[in-house]
Image (cartoon, rainbow, N blue to C red):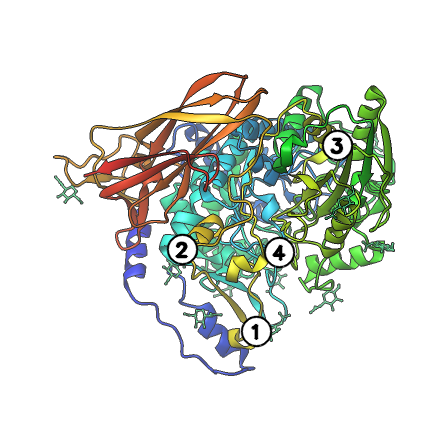
């Protein structure tokens, strides 16, 4: 430990030596190019910190692991670090057993919207929906119930949740897999989800993707082209990209997955600064790091940099070569032991599921007879429903067009109202990757998927914009879900019509349908697709926009529902006078239709809020709209320079004075709320202070003695990093009252203006259900971290001297209450 700190300091203070640029134009000297670009640009941090289990709750797991690993040969130790395929289970990742010593192997399976690819599991609302709920308890419960399903299937490690991408690039195909475009919201949601998954002590989470993984384009090396490099300065790294991972570490996620991209030109799965430095030293991580699938590009060097397990196979690098490298002296015995010990410790800590992978038949041929393990549970259904419900965001509602009031005739339009014609495990890749709604021949979808998994080539350069073959309940790729059923919008509206004796008329086929005269309302269902493997080619689908305009031109009470897997621009029609209501329905999973009907008929008030910004036009995102593409200037080593610092999403809009269409945090309900009686109190000793991220100490400028936190041993930092960062140092209280005519939930948001930092940063939120006339007091705790900025020079967090602005709002722009906190 001490050694690694010293080495780190030495490395970061000496200037990196970068070889001379071999060429200014197109060079074909690939070795020289590689030397120039790939080396010496990310600080070396060695050796890899040893996992010792000092933190409370880990000591026993480590003790047992050490004694089990002591009985293993080096070949066996290397074997459990290296993914393999199990002949009789369908685990996406399989760490082989060492039966001789009682280690049965470990099964890894995703993902954040439901288990996949497997049968008899639940399709949950996707993380973007959970983020839109702004409901911490719901995030916890969703994680908890999914945890039960992992357990039922014999999964040891759940390949979720997602902290990265954080949402730097608006078109990123994977933003929906995470929890919105703000690090605080994402951090809270990841924390709760991990606590939920790990609650029973049976399943470990694997938070991903570490780190600065912000685009799909060029995520894989192709030919001589290396993966895109995210070039991020240290302060931005801490305040934006690492922030949610701190919360994930605070929640003690047993595993972390490193990402496909490079950081400062060094691959994420062999970057010693990020794995040894940030994760295993600064954040006290004592679990194991697992490579994203096919993300390993080196042998023992990657292990030295902090990688502990490679998936889904040796990649032609690890396995027996690791033990060989110990034998021939290139690789240390200590590191190999540490890797195996970390893996076995996590296995010990999380209940040692007997017969791992037992409920998960091989996915190779679902058409053959096989035994079924039903992981679904009646006890989970309320949570599943609530997750879908609260992820809907009502953004427009003219003259209370919603809720619907005993309609006589309702007209329904759009391809998204009905389920896809085929949802069947035996149908192949469409089911595997959640492409059932995609309007394409099977062949194109298969080509696309095999292409992107094998080499990342954009066979389908513009990707599918929308799922014209049916309602979109989830996104595509490895965080999709495999629904046991889908309650489609049409099915739910028909059920309601049956109760009320409403007549429905519908046309789910045409772009310019006829409209039945005298319809009480015309509801248009469209969607916006996104998937792992490619970035979107825009933020709106023109075909669907035309459909909406066509219906609106014939119906003066047109409502639009969008199942959107990402930011959806609506300006092609939002001001149309006949469009009276718009719902961003996100990705609700199997309960899509029923939850929508509950909201539109007013059985429940909408309560979701946008976890990102919707601009008036795509170009308002500036260089944060599109991914960085390979070009001649990057010399086969695509460079994504994160020059905007922390100013992504709403911070970008506020800084550049751009008015959005719908701002971060925005969303309507059927009721209205007043905010009052804001009070700000703080700890007596709130003074400028510095938390040393590597010593774990806090130094205060005005106090007599600079405290060392009790939790800090000096040898190793606790999970989540320096303990004083998590102290509550200030409290904000306020009262919120429901002054409308319907019970509804309000989301009160707290933003802070730290001196010298962005004008507003989210630092708290509370969701509260209130009856008509009910008034409650809400309390927000602010931690030292919440009020600090990263000091790159001193490697720690500074609580600033000066005036902090505190805002309580309905969104980042709608701020009824404002106060100040003086730090002197
Ligand atoms: C990347 O480079 C920047 C600028 O030199 C530096 O601040 C940062 O710490 C580096 N991060 C990593 C992970 O290499
Ligand atoms: C390594 O794992 C494979 C299964 O992937 C197994 O066949 C082999 O026997 C194992 N080798 C050792 C040394 O444990
Ligand atoms: C070991 O390294 C050799 C040479 O690079 C490679 O061909 C082989 O596939 C590697 N073995 C494993 C199990 O990865
Ligand atoms: C030791 O073994 C590893 C793995 O096979 C190999 O990559 C490395 O080149 C070897 N080193 C020496 C000095 O033979
Ligand atoms: C199903 O399970 C039973 C009992 O464990 C077993 O005998 C049978 O071989 C299994 N069938 C298949 C198709 O796996
Ligand atoms: C969807 O595919 C069908 C052919 O299967 C085609 O006729 C139709 O135009 C497509 N729809 C859209 C909106 O592209
Ligand atoms: C990538 O894979 C696709 C489909 O397997 C193949 O057609 C294409 O040639 C490959 N491209 C490269 C650069 O390897
Ligand atoms: C609104 O709908 C009515 C039909 O109800 C139609 O006559 C009118 O032209 C529409 N308005 C616009 C601006 O399209
Ligand atoms: C590879 O890099 C070159 C040079 O930067 C670029 O022109 C080309 O488009 C890249 N190819 C791919 C498949 O990204
Ligand atoms: C990224 O930053 C590097 C180093 O400052 C610079 O050489 C390069 O031109 C930048 N690339 C782009 C695309 O701005
Ligand atoms: C406490 O820390 C502050 C700020 O780093 C420093 O100025 C002061 O001298 C320290 N006080 C003691 C008693 O060490």
State whether residue 466 is above or below residue 748. below
Task: Mark 4 and mark 1 in contact? Answer it, CB < 8 Å.
Answer: no
Q: Position of residue 94 (x, y in %)?
A: 65, 43
The part of the image, by quadrant, that contains residue 808 is: top left
Distance Cα–Cα, label 4 vs label 1: 24 Å
Residue occupied by mark 1: 631
Q: Secondary structure at mark 2?
A: helix
Residue occupied by mark 4: 294
**N-terminal label among 4 and 2:** 2
**N-terminal label among 3 and 4:** 4
Q: Secondary structure at mark 4?
A: loop
Camera-side mark, 3 or 4:
3
Q: Secondary structure at mark 3?
A: helix
Residue occupied by mark 2: 273
The part of the image, by quadrant, that contains residue 779 is: top left
Distance Cα–Cα, label 4 vs label 2: 21 Å
**N-terminal label among 4 and 1:** 4
């Amino acid at each position: 430990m001490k050694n690694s700190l010293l080495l780190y300091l030495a490395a970061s203070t000496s200037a990196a030596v970068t070889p001379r640029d071999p060429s200014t134009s197109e060079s074909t000297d690939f070795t020289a190019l590689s030397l120039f670009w790939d080396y010496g640009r990310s600080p070396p941090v060695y050796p890899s910190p040893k996992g010792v289990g000092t933190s409370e709750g880990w000591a026993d797991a480590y003790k047992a692991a050490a004694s089990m690993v002591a009985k293993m040969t080096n070949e066996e130790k290397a074997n459990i670090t290296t993914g393999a395929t199990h002949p009789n289970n369908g685990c996406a990742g399989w760490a082989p057993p060492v039966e001789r010593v009682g280690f049965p192997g470990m099964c890894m399976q995703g993902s954040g919207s439901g288990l996949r690819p497997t049968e008899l599991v639940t399709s949950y609302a996707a993380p973007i929906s959970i983020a839109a709920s702004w409901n911490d308890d719901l995030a916890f419960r969703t994680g908890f119930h999914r945890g039960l399903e992992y357990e039922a299937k014999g999964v040891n490690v759940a390949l979720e949740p997602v902290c990265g991408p954080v949402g730097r690039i608006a078109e990123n195909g994977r933003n929906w897999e995470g929890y919105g475009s703000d690090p605080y919201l994402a951090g809270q949601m990841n924390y709760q989800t991990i606590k939920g998954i790990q609650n029973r002590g049976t399943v470990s989470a694997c938070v991903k993707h570490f780190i600065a993984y912000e685009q799909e384009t060029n995520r894989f090396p192709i030919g001589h082209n290396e993966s895109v490099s995210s070039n991020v300065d240290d302060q931005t790294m801490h305040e934006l990209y690492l922030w949610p991972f701190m919360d994930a570490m605070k929640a003690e996620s047993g595993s972390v997955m490193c990402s496909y991209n490079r950081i400062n030109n060094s691959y994420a799965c062999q970057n010693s600064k990020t794995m040894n430095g940030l994760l295993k030293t600064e954040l006290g991580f004592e679990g194991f790091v697992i490579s994203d699938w096919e993300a390993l590009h080196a042998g023992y060097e990657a292990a030295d940099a902090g990688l502990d397990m490679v998936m889904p196979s040796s990649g032609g690098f690890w396995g027996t070569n690791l033990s060989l490298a110990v034998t021939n002296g290139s690789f240390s015995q200590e590191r190999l032991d540490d890797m195996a010990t970390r893996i076995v410790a996590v296995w010990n800590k999380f209940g040692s599921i007997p017969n791992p992978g037992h409920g998960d038949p091989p996915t190779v041929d679902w058409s053959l007879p096989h035994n079924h393990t039903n992981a679904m549970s009646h006890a989970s259904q309320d949570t599943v429903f609530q997750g879908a419900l609260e992820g809907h965001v009502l953004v427009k509602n003219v003259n209370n067009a919603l809720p619907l009031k005993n309609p006589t005739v309702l007209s329904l339009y759009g391809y998204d109202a009905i389920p896809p014609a085929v949802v069947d495990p035996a149908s192949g890749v469409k089911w595997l990757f959640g492409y059932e709604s995609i309007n394409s021949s099977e062949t194109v979808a298969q080509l696309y998927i095999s292409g992107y998994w094998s080499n990342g080539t954009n066979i389908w350069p513009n990707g599918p914009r929308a799922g014209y073959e049916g309602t979109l309940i989830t996104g595509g790729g490895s965080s999709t879900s495999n629904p046991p059923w889908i309650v489609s919008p049409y099915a739910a509206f028909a059920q309601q019509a049956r109760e009320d004796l409403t007549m429905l008329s519908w046309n789910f086929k045409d772009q310019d349908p006829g409209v039945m005269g005298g319809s009480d309302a015309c509801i248009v269902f469209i969607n916006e697709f996104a998937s792992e493997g490619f970035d979107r080619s825009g933020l709106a689908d023109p075909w669907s926009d035309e459909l909406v305009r066509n219906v609106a031109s014939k119906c003066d009470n047109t409502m639009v529902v969008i199942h959107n897997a990402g930011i959806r621009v609506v300006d092609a029609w939002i001001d149309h006078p006949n469009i009276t209501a718009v719902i961003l329905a996100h990705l609700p999973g199997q309960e899509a239709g029923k939850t929508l009907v509950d909201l539109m008929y007013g059985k429940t008030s909408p309560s979701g809020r946008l976890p990102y910004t919707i601009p008036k036009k795509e170009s308002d995102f500036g260089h944060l709209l599109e991914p960085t593409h390979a070009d001649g200037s990057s010399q086969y080593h695509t460079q994504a320079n994160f020059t905007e610092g922390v100013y992504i999403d709403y911070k970008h809009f506020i800084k550049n004075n751009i008015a959005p269409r719908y701002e971060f945090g925005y969303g309507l309900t059927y009721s209205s709320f007043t905010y009052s009686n804001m009070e700000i109190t703080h700890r007596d000793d709130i003074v400028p202070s510095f938390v040393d991220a590597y010593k774990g100490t806090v130094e205060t400028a005005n106090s007599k003695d600079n405290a060392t936190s009790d939790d800090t041993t000096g040898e190793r930092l606790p999970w989540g990093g320096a303990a004083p960062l998590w102290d509550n140092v200030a409290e904000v209280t306020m009262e919120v009252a429901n002054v409308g005519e319907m019970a509804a939930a309000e989301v009160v948001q707290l933003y802070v203006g730290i001196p010298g930092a962005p004008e507003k940063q989210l630092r708290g939120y509370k969701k509260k259900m209130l009856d008509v006339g009910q008034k409650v007091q809400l309390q927000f705790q602010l931690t030292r971290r919440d009020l600090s900025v990263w000091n790159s020079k001193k490697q720690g967090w500074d609580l600033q001297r000066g005036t902090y602005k505190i805002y309580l709002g309905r969104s980042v722009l709608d701020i009824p209450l404002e106060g100040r906190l003086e730090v002197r």
